[in-house]
Amino acid sequence: MSVTLEQEKVDELVERFYSKLIKDSYYSSMFEERGVDIELLKSRQRTFISRLVSEDASKDQDNVSKINERHPFQTTPERAEIWMNTMEQTLNEMKLDDSIKEHLLEKIGFLMSKLIK
C-alpha cells in the first residue's frame, strides 16, 4: 500500500507530537540527559515519517536495521506505550485520512516493538 502525506502535514504532525512528548517527564529528562537537539530530532523525524508513510511492507526490515543503528538502546513497554499513545493522540487531532493514520500507526508500532526490551 502506498499512501501520500503532504510535507506540510508531516511537519505539523512532528511539531504537534514533540510539543506533547517533551511534556512527559521521562522523555524530557532523557532528552536533556542525552543532550538531544530537539530541532535536529524533529528534522530527522520529518524525513523518517515522509519516507515511512510512502513505503510498503517490503522496506520494513531495512527500517528495522536503520532504527537499530540510530537507537542503540531499548525501551520499556510502558515508555513505548507513552510514545505510541502520544503519536496516536496527535494523529487523531489532525484532519488526516483514516488510512494514513492506520498506516503510520501500524508501521511505527512495528518499528517501536523492535526497541522494547
Image (cartoon, grey):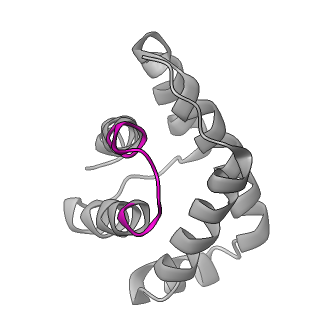
* Quadrant in the picture for the N terminus: top left
Q: Could you tell me if residue 16 is visible in this image?
A: yes
Task: Identify which residue, 3 or 63, lies in the foreground.
Answer: 3
Q: Residue furthest top?
A: 58
Q: Which residue is drawn at 38% across and 46% down?
A: 101
Task: Identify which residue, 91 or 48, lies in the foreground.
Answer: 91
Q: Which residue is drawn at 52% across and 69% down?
A: 17
Q: How far from the left and from the top, in percent, is residue 64?
A: 46, 28
Q: In this image, 85 relative to 1: left or right?
A: left
The region drawn magenta spans: 92-102
Q: In this view, does 44 lie above or below 107?
A: below
Residue 27 colored in magenta in the image: no
Q: Is residue 10 above or below residue 110?
A: below
Residue 97 colored in magenta in the image: yes
Q: How far from the left and from the top, in percent, is residue 109?
A: 31, 43
Q: How far from the left and from the top, in percent, is residue 85?
A: 29, 66
Q: Could you tell me if residue 37 is visible in this image?
A: no
Q: Is residue 112 above or below residue 42?
A: above
Q: In this view, does 32 lie above or below 6?
A: below
Residue 110 found in image quarter = top left
Q: In this image, 94 relative to 40: left or right?
A: left
- Name the magenta segment's main secondary structure: helix
Q: How many labels does the image show?
A: 0
Q: Residue at x 71, y 43 (%)?
A: 47
Task: Identify which residue, 27 or 6, lies in the foreground.
Answer: 6
Task: Identify which residue, 41 or 87, lies in the foreground.
Answer: 87
